[in-house]
Amino acid sequence: MYKIGLSTTGERINEETIAEYAESGIEYIEISAGKNETDAICFEELKKWVDKYGVKIWSLHLPFCPFDVIDISNEELADFTVGYLSQLIEKASAIGIDKFIIHASGEPIDEDKRKERMSCAKKSLNKLCQVAKENGATICVEDLPRTCLGRSANDILELLDSHPDLKVCFDTNHLLGEDNVEFIKRIGNKIVTMHVSDYDFINERHWLPGEGKNDWQEILKALEEIDYQGIWLYEIDRKCPKTIIRPRRIEFSDFIRNAREVFENKEITIFSTPKENLGYWD
């Protein structure tokens, strides 16, 4: 139904990793790493690797932490953050990367501060969209959990007012106060890319689809209704998180099998058990 992609979260970004993606049949990747690792990327070398192994870079997730350094919604950090992210956009777009995923804020955000933080984020997004446009690229703002900006369709719709070219990355495990299907319907064709993972509706978990409570057939139906044209991009660390019990780490082949089972509405293979009594930040 969709091409299968995979985030590099939790992986080393080197030639060996790119080769492993290719050998496993993963065609598309999103480059996603912390600030220090992202800063260390030589984009010209990265381009050589993906060309050599026939892997396509679908997107780059712009760094979003530490929150006391990077935050487009914080007046004290916004100028530095916009300048820093602008440089990354220019470097990455030079090798053909044309979608950049962004978080509209860090957290926590007090309720009485949301209005001013939203105003600052929108100004920052406008500037970054201009930079992206100049480089033939698109900024995609991501829905986020808890107190972050972007925690609801209303938040995302307000953020979209920042610039006519701003698009959305739909994360399937971040919404804690509203339904994923309703979110898709409200945001519509502004959704141009995804982060696919499952959760328990209590907090973000980044579990493999089938390990949580998402209704994947309803999500697929909603995506079809809005004529979603992106890929099915997993954002899941292959190591076992502390919120779930797995006998082994997730292999690349597990993602391909999982996607086919979801797409074909087959029983999903599950080899994990969620831990009990999960707390808010577990």
Image (tube, rainbow, N blue to C red):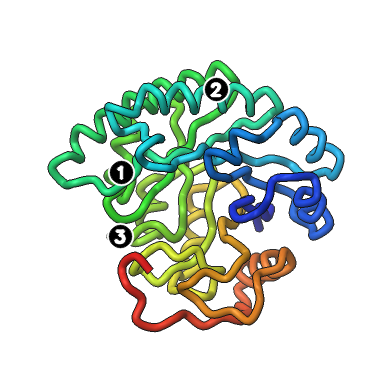
Residue 149 tag number = 1
Q: Few, some or many C-alpha atoms within 10 Å of disc 3 (few <14, some 14-19, many ≥20)?
A: few
User: Along the horizontal axis of the image, is 22 left or right of 129?
Assistant: right
Residue that numbered label 3 is attached to: 178
> Tag on residue 207?
none
> Which image quadrant for residue 264?
bottom right
Question: Along the line of sight, which residue is nearer the eye, 109 or 12?
Answer: 12
Choose mark 1 or mark 2, whichever is in front: 2
Residue shown at 53%/30% (left/top)? 138
Could you tell which of marks 3 and 2 lies nearer the N-terminus? 2
Dot 1 or dot 3, earlier in sequence = 1
Which corner quadrant holds the C terminus? Answer: bottom left
Are the residues at dot 1 and dot 3 in contact (C-beta closer than 8 Å)?
no
- Looking at the rendered image, the disc whose residue lies closer to the viewer, 1 or 3, is 1
* Residue at x-position 79% and y-position 55%: 20
Secondary structure under badge 1?
A: loop
Q: Are marks 3 and 2 in contact (CB under 8 Å)?
A: no
Residue 25 picture quarter: bottom right
Q: Earlier in the sequence, mark 1 or mark 2?
A: 2
Mark seen at residue 87: 2
Kindly check if marks 1 and 2 are in contact, taking CB atoms under 8 A apart as contact.
Answer: no
Residue kind at label 1, given as amino acid type: Leu
* Residue 53 placement (x, y as % from top left): 85, 45
Image x and y of residue 14, in percent = 75, 45
